[in-house]
Amino acid sequence: MDPFLKISGTTRILGIFGDPVAHSRSPEMQNAALVAAGIDAVYVPFHVRPEQRAEAVAGLRAMNVWGVNVTIPHKEAILSHLDAVDENAALIGAVNTVVNRDGRLIGFNTDGPGFLRALAEDLDFYPRERRVLLLGAGGACRAALVALAREGAAWIGIANRDRGRADRLVAEMAPKLPGTALARFSLVEAALTPVLAGVDLLVNTTAVGLHGETFPFDPVASLPENACVYDMVYGKAATPLLQTAAGRGLPCADGRGMLTGQGEEAFRIWTGQEPPSGVMRTRLFGESVAK
């Protein structure tokens, strides 16, 4: 098999909208899968700033782009620019995958399935009857919240710097997810220290750590000895959150497993085919990245 992409007049375009987007490893894994599957398409990054969002979405139709992934900060705001969204994305209120079907743009959210798969494969963690604290209240948090609740999590807390946003998210989602107790907090040490002591899983759904940033306090310090830590951020080195978790000997993982899982679901949506088995995961985990 020829390992290289061949671009021709029939090559279809896939991509990712984000700001920032240069760090994304989606092009690596998606192009590897396209080559392995023998599909005449190429996946490229699009740096789309918030003020350019409407024009960028219109460009998908104008240039007949096959589809895109959507990442920070567009997952929620892009909904108003689409022709339709599937039931799961509508419940979450965020889209991470768009497919262009004859000029009609349809939004999906594959983050939830990707997240659950990563928890199982990378941490051997299953949500049923467990307690989870989510840091952040954006699109990635919404997807994780719905996925965890649907899998039977007993309690989910949402901690955000803007407490009002966490309040609104819990007020919106509590009636839709009646089987799980929801709580909201300010992302401050005094509020979270007693909460963290009873948590089974801590999840960072924000971009904190992407460039080495840290939270205002160390949330790992108050976790029990059997807790797990999942950071949706990934990069060339472990984030400060994961470094601290590893230093305590807690099971922890970065966002590559979630990226692989959601990417395979997106591949199915765009192409109508099963992704080549293990290609995306091997592409990401085959290189040495600290966890």
Image (cartoon, rainbow, N blue to C red):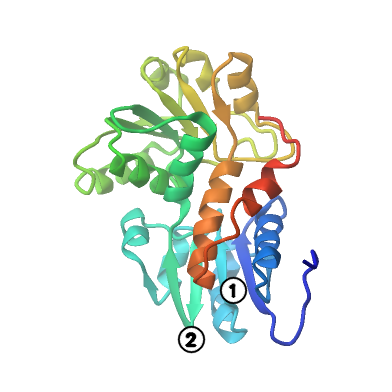
Vertical relation: 235 (above or below) 13: above
Q: Residue 253 versus residue 171: which sits nearer the camera?
A: 253
Q: Is residue 281 left or right of residue 86?
A: right
Q: Position of residue 13 (x, y in %)?
A: 65, 75
| Label 2 vs 1, first from the N-terminus | 1
Q: Position of residue 130 (x, y in %)?
A: 33, 27
Q: Position of residue 83 (x, y in %)?
A: 40, 77
Q: Residues within 10 Å of mark 2 (few under 14, many from 20)?
A: few
Q: Is residue 194 left or right of residue 170?
A: right
Q: Which SS class for mark 1?
A: helix
Q: Residue 41 versus residue 161: which sits nearer the camera?
A: 41
The disc at residue 102 is 2
Q: Position of residue 33 (x, y in %)?
A: 65, 61
Please give the name of the residue rendered at 42% of the width and 34% of the height, measured from the top-left corner.
134
Please give the name of the residue rendered at 46% of the width and 36% of the height, measured from the top-left corner.
120
State the separation of the CA atoms marked 2 and 1. Answer: 17 Å
Q: Residue 15 versus residue 240: which sits nearer the camera?
A: 15
Q: Residue 177: which quarter of the image?
A: top left
The disc at residue 56 is 1
Q: Residues within 10 Å of mark 1 (few under 14, many from 20)?
A: some
Q: Amino acid at mark 2?
A: Asp
Q: Amino acid at mark 1?
A: Ala
Q: Is residue 28 left or right of residue 253?
A: right
Q: Which SS class for mark 2?
A: loop
Q: Residue 223 versus residue 255: which sits nearer the camera?
A: 255
Screen quadrant of the N terminus: bottom right
